Image (tube, rainbow, N blue to C red):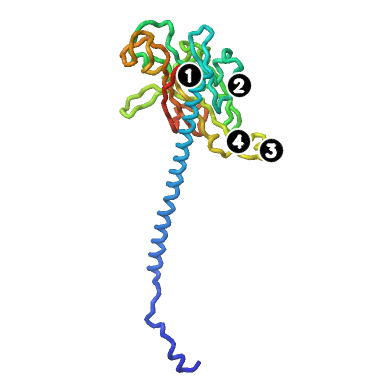
Amino acid sequence: MNLKQMNQQPSLKGISGFTILEILLAVVILTVGLLGLLAVFPVAMDSGRKAVEATNAVIIAQSVEQAIRDGLKEHKAQSRDGRWTYFIFHHDGVTDDYPTDIEKARPGADHYILLPSPDPDATTSIDRDSHWDRGKTFIFPESDGLTWIVDDGLGEREVDNGTEDDFRGSPNGNGNPLLADDDADDREVSGFDGESYRDFDVRRVYTLSNNFFDEEIAEDFDIVDEDPISQYSFAFAIRPARQDASLGIQFPDSSNLVPAGELYEVDIMVFRTFREGTRNADPIYRSQILVHR
């Protein structure tokens, strides 16, 4: 290269690059943008989780509703004296063996559902609202007067209703709703107005299982059940309905009635990661239905 060619090369004089301040400002802008983008991911994941959870809860509640209606239709029986009605509940989560003869079902079994029927000997007309307020509420699976074994991943443990429960009678009143414990007043809840009221308190649940999960294979190969369905459980409460039929001449819209015990309200409650024996547990989903005896 000769001197003339060297003189013809473009000069870099007057061309400037980025300053340190400009580079830092660009990095800050990029970082802020990335942080904002990353902040969206937890929100989106949480929304997706809640959507799946809500969908599962609705499906479970519908399944429980169908099982209750099927029980009242296909697996219903009367007490030996013919005064009281109960049915056998068939659903995933029931742990006690089903009876071969419905007439010999045990009142303490978790598949035994006793209806909170009014006294069949009562003939006096009463106010419909008073009947509804005074009607007993039964929660299933039954926990009054029982102890049961649960395995929540930390080993088996024995659970009962706790020392706060002063009921010392037989489970389900040994088949007599007049002797069974009223579960409607086991929990004190504070309302939005600051006033407190009594409500039922779920201590025991039906825990769902993964029917496609083989426990023997799991033990052999040390497999952990990660199916989310096994994290869900449910319970339901039954009480007489305000719209119950009357044994007298009253019509359904009458303010008075002689309770017939034909119509009941059922509250279905779905839980997730419920720990048995827990007090004041809140369901993730709750629905109410009406059923006929």
The mark nearer the N terminus, 4 or 3, is: 4
Q: Are marks 4 and 3 in contact (CB under 8 Å)?
A: no
Which residue is painted at 48% across and 22% down in the image? 69
Q: Is residue 39 above or below residue 289?
A: below
Q: Nearer the viewer, mark 4 or mark 2?
A: 4
Q: Which residue is mark 3?
A: 220
Q: CA distance from mark 2 to mark 3?
A: 27 Å
**Pointer 4 local density, CA inside 10 Å: few below 14, some 14–19, many at least 20:** few
Q: Amino acid at mark 1?
A: Asp
Q: Amino acid at mark 4?
A: Phe
Q: CA distance from mark 4 to mark 3?
A: 16 Å
Q: Which residue is mark 2?
A: 97
Q: CA distance from mark 1 to mark 2?
A: 27 Å
Q: Which residue is mark 1?
A: 165
**Pointer 2 local density, CA inside 10 Å: few below 14, some 14–19, many at least 20:** few
Q: CA distance from mark 3 to mark 1?
A: 42 Å
Residue 55 locus on image (x, y percent): 46, 37
The mark nearer the N terminus, 3 or 1, is: 1
The mark nearer the N terminus, 2 or 3, is: 2
Q: CA distance from mark 4 to mark 2?
A: 20 Å
Q: Which residue is mark 4?
A: 212
Residue 270 locus on image (x, y percent): 47, 30
Q: Are marks 1 and 2 in contact (CB under 8 Å)?
A: no
The mark nearer the N terminus, 1 or 2, is: 2
Q: Secondary structure at mark 3?
A: helix
Q: Tell whether 256 sits left or right of 72.
A: left
Residue 143 seen in this snapshot: no
Q: Nearer the viewer, mark 3 or mark 1?
A: 3
